[in-house]
Amino acid sequence: MNSLFSAETLVLLAGLTYVLGYLTINQVILRLLILLGTGFYIWYYAVAAEEPLWTAIWTSLAIGAATLLGLIALIGRNSPLMIPKSDRDIYPQFHGMVPGDFRALVRMGRRYVVDQDTVMTTEGSPVEKLHFVTRGAMDAEKKGVAFTLPPQIFVGEVAFMMERDSSATTILKAGSEVIEWDVEKLKRKSRRSTRFKLALEAVISRDLALKVAYAIAVKVDEP
């Protein structure tokens, strides 16, 4: 065997790639380095002794296969191909949510156009549905004060996040389009997947920040 690829060199290369992988934040690069390191270990087990160390080789192959499956799932979750064609128009509004989580979210919801004015939330009442208005107009009332809301925002998100009754009454005007989710289903999904929960909370938090900015802008423009 060439000295460059001696058994000792293979072990060093395998260990080095593992260390670099564990020091890497990027999950794709991490898995690629672990795969490379696993390949070096398999090579080492094949040549270190007179006979290949089959138990170690098969174990390493299992580790490599699991790492590869994780890599494929990671790349798939982040691929734009995961975004359903019917919902690609609204994906930019879910800033920061990877395609896989967005796909899971919209598949749990129902997207439709209302044919008449529809009450989405009632002040002081529990919120059973979370809404995202994709287009149209909304009227709202809070503590006797009436106002309008722009489209492309969540409705009922504060009650959903804080697990309390709605703070306002909102009415979606006829001809508007909305996505509707069952709150309990979203909570169950969030309990099963921390990644999904964090992604959804990040999107809702951004939505709340935009609403604060919108409210400030409206007050500034008022005479």
Image: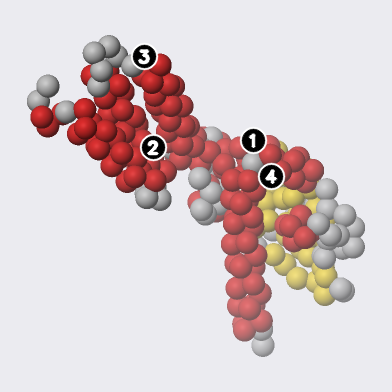
Residue 54: assigned label: 3
What is the CA distance from the residue labelled 3 to the residue labelled 1? 45 Å
Closer to the N terminus: mark 2 or mark 4?
A: 2
In front: mark 3 or mark 2? 3
Pick out the residue farthest to the left.
2
Q: Counting other residues with Cα less than 10 Å from the Cα at mark 1, is it few (<14), some (14-19), or many (20 or more)?
A: few
Residue shown at 27% from the left, 11% from the top: 51
> How many numbered marks does the figure carry?
4
Decide if residue 17 is on the left or right side of residue 31. Answer: left
Whether 29 is drawn above or below 143: the answer is: above
What is the CA distance from the residue labelled 1 to the residue labelled 2? 29 Å
Q: Counting other residues with Cα less than 10 Å from the Cα at mark 2, is it few (<14), some (14-19), or many (20 or more)?
A: many
Q: Position of residue 182 (x, y in %)?
A: 77, 42
Closer to the N terminus: mark 3 or mark 2?
A: 2
Q: What is the three-letter code of the residue carrying label 3?
A: Trp
Q: Position of residue 98 (x, y in %)?
A: 50, 45
Whether 157 is drawn above or below 101: the answer is: below
Q: Secondary structure at mark 3?
A: helix
Residue 190: assigned label: 4
Whether 218 is drawn above or below 70: the answer is: below
Decide if residue 181 is on the left or right side of residue 142. Answer: left
Pick out the residue farthest to the top.
51
Q: Secondary structure at mark 2?
A: helix
Residue shown at 28% from the left, 42% from the top: 16
